[in-house]
Image (cartoon, coloured by chain):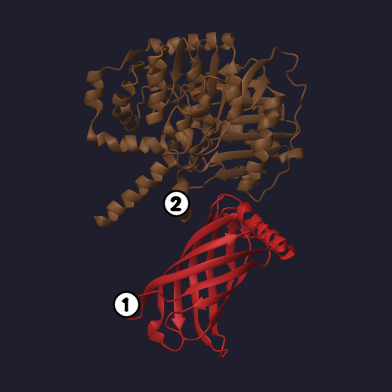
Chain colours: A brown, B red
Amino acid sequence: MKRVLVFCGLFLLLFLLFGCTSTTSLVKGPSVDTSLSFEQKMESYDIPKIEMTYPTIYFDGELWRERMIELVRSAEDYIIISSFLASSSDCLDELYSLIAQKAEEGIRIYFIVDGTGAFDMTETRFHLIPLKFLRDSGVHLLEYNPMSAARLVAGPKILLRDHRKYLIVDGKHLAIGGMNLNYISIGAAGNDLQRDSMYEFASPELCSVMLDEFVPWWNSQTWDDVLREDFPVDHAFGKDEEQFTAWFANQFPFSEKLAGMFGSLLAEAEVSVKALPFLPFFDQYLLSVFRQTAQRGVDVEMVIPFDSRVSNRKGIEFIAKDLLSMHINLRMEKESEKTQRLLHEKLMIVDSRYVVFGSSNLNYRSFTLAYEMSLVLDSPALAKELEAHFATIFEDSAPITKEQTDLWRRLDNWPRYAFGIIGG
Amino acid sequence: MKRFLIVVLLLLFLAFPLVAKSFGYGIGMYGQRVIATEQDSSSGVELSFVYQPWLLPVGNPSVHIKGAMGSDMQGSFTFPYVELGVSVDLFRIIKHPFNFFANNIVAYDPAFSLAYHFDRDSTSHLMSVGFSPFKLSQKDFWYEFFAFYVAIDVGTGAVDNWGINLVRYTYFFK
């Protein structure tokens, strides 16, 4: 018993140490400095400003899969793919066979998948074909932080995950969003297919920024070294279209970029905030920043997905009482035929002007323990389009009441909540 | 003044790799045979700390300190040795038959080591020479199998003890 207590104590200590590092910027520092403009705040968090075209949004995994097949087929030089969960299946054979074929034709393909990909516990597990076969075709496959008994020696590092989802083709085409490259994200039909989003656009500046960060990161992970000059960017691509201002946060574990970005945005909010957090396992600072935003009179609406996976749902139900203490318009999707398809989307819209999209959930793990990518786009037109989309989700939700949260706050749900904090 | 500057420059030179590269720690399973007093032979866990100042394609020196703890032939708990030494890779190759072992590319880089071998029960000065024939590495991780050493009494030249690490995993902070 003593040993168990010592172990738990050490774990808690590590957890607290992690906790001190990267979500405080939501409520402290430049993000809440009223003397700074939003642009200056982004600069202070080393979040670069870029220009990009109006994005094409894919809310349907099958459509994104078809588009991705087109993009991969069109590649002439290189492709970089990153996905938290990625695996083949019968319905994804066309995509993955094409990736293998293009690599055999000499297109350089760099494919990053997180080490948890092989431990996918969603419906994907019944269809999962690991991607190792891609290596035989010459795909440069990197599994980030693989899960194995030997690597348990790495201790808490096993918690660090690469949650980014992006695609770069020939330094021209870019896509960022929440969709994984597995069965439930882009392969399944019917209720197994998740509701999610991917944003495709052109931005030579962002391509350059991403490649500048990709090359040293890749080289730090593998012996398969690459050079920055091997990845040219087409600086004219998309420049004939209207350009929009955006800021790009490439978050790495324990950095404060995401907290700084979201904290700054929420501090700027004057009228409304609409958020789809996916798994809202909030820590004290996330709770504080939304509470403070609501206290300023900002209308904050947040819709939590109905998660048919019992473990996640019970974990979220456990924390619902804390979420309710933010005094925002907190809602949960109703259980229905539609919501059997899990809402995996991550989105925040501020003052009908700023739109935040990317891989990051609104939760402690994304802000602290993961690699994430998020973009803030300054576009009232996109905000309007996405507010209409948000409204359709809002319609199918119901307010969470105090009575519900009292019932949900059960001790037997605590382990699910605790797991959600570090694994959600 | 000149000497002071040289010392400062020397310290800066030595400190540079300290911030540039990484420390690691490892855990292994050892077995040790003591020649003179066989009942002191032991097996158990070996913990190690490694400092790898560079990531060179050839040589790639590292400094290590290792400590073993286990049980001897009578079943008593024992700390048989502590080592402080250096390791050098013989070579590093990416294309080899052991890539099946890990999901990502793993390099094959067998290593030699030379260490001061401290045994609190011994009055002699011992040096150990080791060889890790199956050392596989990634940029943040070493997998070693069947690494062995021989500890020699510096005074007499006789073998004092020898041992083998069935497995040793070393993780490097980045």
Callouts 2 and 1 in the same chain: no
Q: Nearer the viewer, residue A283 or A128?
A: A283
Looking at the image, residue A422 lies above or below residue A346: below
Instruction: Identify the residue position indicated by label 2 in the image.
Output: A155
Instruction: Identify the residue position indicated by label 1 in the image.
Output: B75
Which of the 4 image quadrants contains residue B153? Answer: bottom right
Which residue is depicted at the point 71% across and 44% down?
A226
- Measured as percent of width and height from the top left, residue A351 is found at 50, 11
- Measured as percent of width and height from the top left, residue B141 is found at 55, 55
Q: Residues within 10 Å of mark 1 (few under 14, many from 20)?
A: few
Mark 2–mark 1 CB contact (< 8 Å): no
Which of the 4 image quadrants contains residue B43? Answer: bottom left
Q: How many marks?
A: 2
Which residue is depicted at the point 45% across and 32% down?
A24
Which of the 4 image quadrants contains residue A214? Answer: top right
Question: What's the residue type where badge 2 is placed?
Answer: Gly
Q: Is residue A333 left or right of residue A96?
A: left
Residue A287 shows up from this direction: yes
Which residue is depicted at the point 56% across and 91% down?
B156
Residue B12: numbered disc: none
Element type at mark 2: helix
Which residue is depicted at the point 72% across and 65% down?
B3
